[in-house]
């Protein structure tokens, strides 16, 4: 005899019209704009062939910014286009004209988006319309030769290069922002319940996994207005990845109240409200070790659903005392006839109001800023063996990126900067001998120098002809 058990429809993403998808986790590659190069220019006009340096600075690269937009409901756009790049700054020009700054790239995300590194470190939790987070900063523009001129170096024949913008991969995870989460087995009636309580119109049918996306509904009970999330059905083993449960358990994390929706009219053998409750509780407890926030400590309500069915009403009466013994508030309801919904909505409102009253007052809209680490040494010198040394640090690495190594005067200027920073002295203290190999940068990417301490540096030597440096002659 053929199996007549209703089957879930073929999945096209996570619900919605054909071809639509609900995406709640993406890996996004972002690249901020590079800074524009500075300009090396000398003012020229009739009878004034060398009127002084007038090269402008390069423009700053654009930032990549995430912003919460209430009208954005999914991360689908970044699933299809996972790489985003801001525009770079323009190069400086003569006549002291600075290059234009690059345009910032604003990426809208849903309310409740968590930004993480690929290693799982939380960078930002974006809650509240208009909340912003600069995920990648644009590179600084290079200085033109007009800004580099001084008493010793009156007409620099070089300019600094623009710095590259930040480039990184981040993980975006959407956690539904709701006050109450409805949890239960597939076809327990959660979608019907949220439709009856609010103006939400979720897709409803009598087969497993009808709900493939979290649905949100707004409920008013007296003076309390709160949101209810219809979380897709859980099954046994959801916390280990079975079914759709693990994928959507994160959407429960923000809810202050959990409501067990138990099907009292299920035709499936071996299932009853008590066993369903135990299975869901076990999955919530198991998720505590996997998720960012525990779920087992949330206040709960129990809803015995579908009591409009005579046998279901009888079963609800039989199991109610078991939940009463556990100190849980129990409501016998019918989404079809709206029986018991008013009492349920006010009970949820009471729990939500109590939770809100216990929370510190926060502004609805926040600007999230992640400042760069401060303090610590400007650089470090580490012996690598065989008269080889590695110089690391933010300033040396930045200066390397700004240097045009095809221009001897620019290389001499870099040597002066490093000497003034104290790199020469620190190398001597570390035991470097003349001719030692010095790597400046990081262990993965660096530039190699031969250390020659007898060459004077750091005293703003007159470099000679534009674009040259006497100290580098013959080297």
Image (spheres, rainbow, N blue to C red):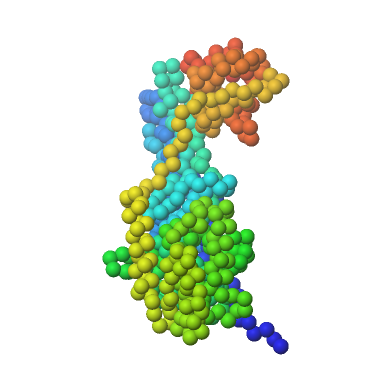
Picture residue at 47% right of the left edge, 66% below the top: 325
Describe residue 353's horizontal placement relative to residue 286 as left or right.
left
Can I make out residue 7 in this image? Answer: no
Depth check: give the residue in front, 274 or 456.
Answer: 274
Q: Quadrant of the C terminus?
A: top right
Outermost bottom residue:
1
The x, y position of residue 430, in whole percent, is 61, 16
Depth check: give the residue in front, 397 or 287.
Answer: 287
Outermost left residue:
223
Q: Quadrant of the N terminus?
A: bottom right
Q: Is residue 470 above or below residue 248?
A: above
> In which image quadrant can residue 338 be found?
bottom left
Picture residue at 40% right of the left edge, 24% below the top: 52
Can I make out residue 425 in this image? Answer: yes
The x, y position of residue 70, in whole percent, is 39, 61
Picture residue at 57% right of the left edge, 52% below the top: 289
Picture residue at 33% right of the left edge, 60% below the top: 353
Depth check: give the residue in front, 331 or 64.
Answer: 331
Q: Is residue 83 above or below residue 216?
A: above
Describe residue 70's horizontal placement relative to residue 393 as left or right.
left
Describe residue 147's horizontal placement relative to residue 319 as left or right.
left
> In which image quadrant can residue 431 be found?
top right
The x, y position of residue 260, in whole percent, is 48, 68
């Amino acid at each position: 005899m053929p199996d007549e058990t209703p089957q879930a429809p073929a999945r096209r993403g996570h619900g919605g019209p054909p071809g639509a998808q609900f995406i709640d986790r993406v890996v996004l590659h972002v690249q901020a704009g590079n800074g524009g190069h500075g300009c090396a220019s000398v003012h020229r006009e009739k009878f004034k062939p060398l009127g002084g340096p007038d090269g402008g600075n390069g423009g700053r690269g654009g930032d990549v910014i995430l912003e919460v937009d209430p009208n954005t409901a999914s991360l689908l756009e970044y699933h299809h286009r996972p790489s985003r790049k801001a525009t770079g700054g323009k190069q400086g020009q003569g006549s002291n004209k600075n290059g234009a700054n690059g345009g910032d790239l604003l990426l809208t995300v849903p309310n409740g988006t968590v930004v993480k590194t690929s290693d799982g470190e939380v960078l930002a939790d974006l809650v509240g319309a208009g909340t912003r987070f600069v995920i990648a900063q644009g590179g600084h523009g290079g200085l033109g030769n007009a800004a580099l001129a001084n008493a010793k170096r009156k007409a620099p024949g070089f300019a600094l290069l623009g710095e590259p913008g930040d480039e990184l991969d981040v993980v975006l995870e959407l956690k539904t922002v709701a006050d109450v989460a409805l949890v239960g087995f597939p076809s327990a009636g959660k979608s019907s319940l949220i439709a009856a309580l609010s103006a939400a119109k979720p897709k409803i049918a009598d087969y497993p996994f009808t709900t493939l996306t979290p649905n949100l509904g707004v409920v008013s009970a007296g003076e309390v207005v709160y949101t209810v999330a219809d979380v897709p059905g859980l099954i046994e083993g959801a916390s280990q990845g079975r079914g759709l449960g693990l994928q959507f358990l994160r959407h429960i994390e923000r809810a202050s109240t959990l409501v067990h929706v138990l099907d009292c009219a299920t035709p499936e053998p071996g299932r009853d409200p008590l066993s369903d409750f135990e299975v869901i509780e076990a999955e919530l407890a198991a998720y505590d070790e996997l998720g960012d926030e525990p779920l087992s400590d949330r206040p709960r309500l129990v809803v015995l659903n579908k009591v409009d069915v005579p046998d279901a009403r009888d079963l609800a009466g039989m199991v109610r005392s078991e939940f009463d013994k556990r100190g849980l508030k129990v409501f016998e309801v019918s989404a079809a006839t709206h029986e018991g919904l008013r009492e349920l909505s006010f009970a949820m409102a009471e729990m939500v109001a109590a939770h809100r009253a216990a929370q510190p007052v926060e502004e609805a809209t926040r600007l999230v800023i992640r400042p760069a680490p401060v303090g610590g040494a400007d650089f470090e010198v580490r012996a690598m063996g065989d008269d080889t040394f590695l110089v690391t640090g933010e300033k040396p690495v930045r200066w390397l990126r700004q240097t045009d190594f095809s221009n001897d005067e620019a290389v001499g200027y870099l040597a002066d900067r490093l000497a003034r920073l104290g790199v020469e002295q620190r190398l001597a203290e570390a035991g470097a001998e003349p001719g030692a190999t010095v790597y400046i940068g990081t262990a993965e990417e660096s530039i190699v120098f031969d250390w020659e301490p007898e060459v004077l540096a750091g005293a703003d030597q007159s470099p000679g002809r534009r674009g040259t440096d006497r100290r580098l002659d013959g080297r």
